[in-house]
Image (cartoon, rainbow, N blue to C red):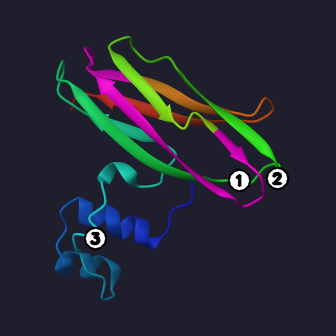
Amino acid sequence: YDVGPNDYINFLCGQGYSTTTLRRITGDNNTCTSANRGSVFNLNLPSFALATARSSYNSVSYGRTVTNVGSARSTYRAIVSGYPSSLNIQVVPNVLTFTSLGQRLSFTLRIQGTINADLDSFSLTWDDGTHQVRSPIVVYVP
């Protein structure tokens, strides 16, 4: 899960920061435009969090890109475990097949449904049969 300066700029612009505030933070001439107002859900971090009202329906997608640092040729399957039955969790695609070291592949995690507790936590694990890469997922009522 690589993340760089432009990812943070898109995140801050997506949070509603103005160009003036962004420039104070970055110390450069970056601007917030419609092109870089990325979804706050797409900051390329290995964790996922959703704040929501109890019992309200949610449909949220998180875009992520991962870089192969393991075996040059490997296939990872997505496993999402421990989530409540009131949620539907999808990973698209649910299989990532790497053909070279350093290769980058993208996926989307979708959370749909409601939560009935103050906090639900579960995980997404990418498994190639030897290595497991686990990412926490938290859905909570603020």
User: x, y (%) of residue 47?
Assistant: 47, 42
Q: Amino acid at mark 3?
A: Ala
- In the image, what residue occupies the spot 32% across and 61% down? 11
Q: Is residue 98 magenta?
A: yes
What secondary structure predominates along the stretch shown in magenta?
Answer: strand
Q: Is residue 18 left or right of residue 85?
A: left
- In the image, what residue occupies the spot 21% across and 32% down? 142
Find disc 3 in the rendering and name its residue. Answer: 35
Q: Is residue 28 left or right of residue 57?
A: right
Give the Cα distance between marks 3 and 2. 34 Å
Residue 68 got which mark? 1
User: x, y (%) of residue 112?
Assistant: 31, 26
Give the Cα distance between marks 3 and 1. 28 Å
3 or 1: tag closer to the N-terminus: 3
State if disc 2 and disc 1 touch (CB < 8 Å). Answer: yes
- In the image, what residue occupies the spot 33% across and 85% down? 27
State if disc 2 and disc 3 touch (CB < 8 Å). Answer: no
Above or below 132: residue 1? below
Q: Residues within 10 Å of mark 1 (few under 14, many from 20)?
A: some
User: What range of the chain is rendered magenta?
Assistant: 96-120
Find disc 2 in the rendering and name its residue. Answer: 72
3 or 2: tag closer to the N-terminus: 3
Q: Residues within 10 Å of mark 2 (few under 14, many from 20)?
A: few
Q: Is residue 8 left or right of residue 91?
A: left
Q: Quadrant of residue 84?
A: top left
Q: Amino acid at mark 2?
A: Ala
Q: Amino acid at mark 1?
A: Asn
Give the Cα distance between marks 1 and 2. 7 Å
Q: Residues within 10 Å of mark 3 (few under 14, many from 20)?
A: few
Above or below 83: residue 40? below
- In the image, what residue occupies the spot 18% across and 62% down? 16
